[in-house]
Amino acid sequence: MKVTVIDINGKETGRKADLSDAVFGIEPNNHAVYLDVKQYLANQRQGTHKAKERAEIVGSTRKIKKQKGTGTARAGSIKSPVFKGGGRVFGPRPRNYSFKLNKNLKKLARKSALSIKAGDKAITVVEDFSFDTVKTKNFTAVLKSLGLENKKSLFVLAESNKNVYLSSRNLKDSEVITSSELSTYKILNAESIVLLEGSLKGIETNLSK
């Protein structure tokens, strides 16, 4: 698949990038995508939720009324769940929500996500760039030139670039990552994927080996 390479001003450079069909042109596996996104979201959960059950409530253990003759239901403890301030029945307990997925399945999911975006014409290849200083307006100018100022975008760099990353950090609809940080969730969560020319080799290497 051939894609025209543009610069940060949105103008064609006269070069074309070759996107591997093995990564950007496969038949998407929807179930693999579902599992990988599910794992990503599960890993974001802290799992620290906790409610006290009746054994953990601080209170008297005195039998609050006699067993018979009151005309109401029997009650043996003020910590019973039926009373205000009592313990909760089957309340949430701390747990780990993460689960394991095979590496090959995760690679298939990422390739499927990239193929979906490629099929939707949502992938743009931009020549490598950097900023001399950290300024949000520099990154905003790039978004405007690429027509992405009102879209949720994901920029994929070949390697970490502090100035580019910090310049984008205040913009809630844009995210800058490296090719090694690419995930199925982030690919699908963005309306437009901007691949820097130097990142293509890393992406294809990571997903092909």
Image (tube, rainbow, N blue to C red):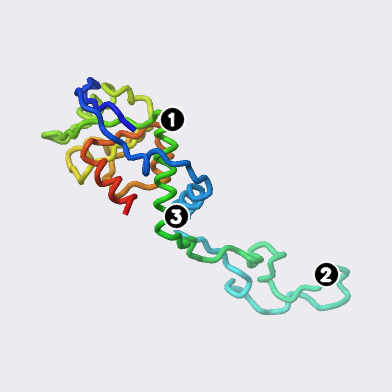
Residue beneath disc 3: 105
> In x, y percent, where is residue 136?
22, 31
Q: Residue at x 33, y 40 (%)?
A: 20
- For badge 1, the amino acid type reads Asp
Q: CA distance from mark 1 to mark 2?
A: 65 Å
132 horizontally vs 56: left or right? left
The secondary element bearing badge 3 is classed as: helix
The residue nearer to you, when weighing 158 against 44, is: 158
91 horizontally vs 64: left or right? left
Q: Of the two numbered discs 1 and 2 on the same chain, state the one appearing first in sequence.
A: 2
> In x, y percent, where is residue 209?
31, 54
The residue nearer to you, when weighing 9 against 48, is: 9
Say which quadrant the N terminus sits in: top left
Callout 2–callout 3 Cβ contact below 8 Å: no
- For badge 3, the amino acid type reads Leu
155 horizontally vs 46: left or right? left
Residue beneath disc 1: 120
Query: Which of label 2 and label 3 is nearer to you?
Result: 3
Q: Is residue 90 above or below residue 191?
A: below
CA neighbours of label 2 inside 10 A, class few (<14), some (14 to 19), many (20+): few
Residue farthest to the left, as pictured: 132
The residue nearer to you, when weighing 43 against 2, is: 2
CA neighbours of label 1 inside 10 A, class few (<14), some (14 to 19), many (20+): few
Q: Is residue 111 above or below residue 196?
A: below
- For badge 2, the amino acid type reads Ala
Residue beneath disc 2: 73
Q: Is residue 86 above or below residue 108?
A: below
Callout 1–callout 3 Cβ contact below 8 Å: no
> In x, y percent, where is residue 18?
28, 35
CA neighbours of label 3 inside 10 A, class few (<14), some (14 to 19), many (20+): some
Q: CA distance from mark 2 to mark 3?
A: 56 Å
> In x, y percent, where is residue 79?
66, 71
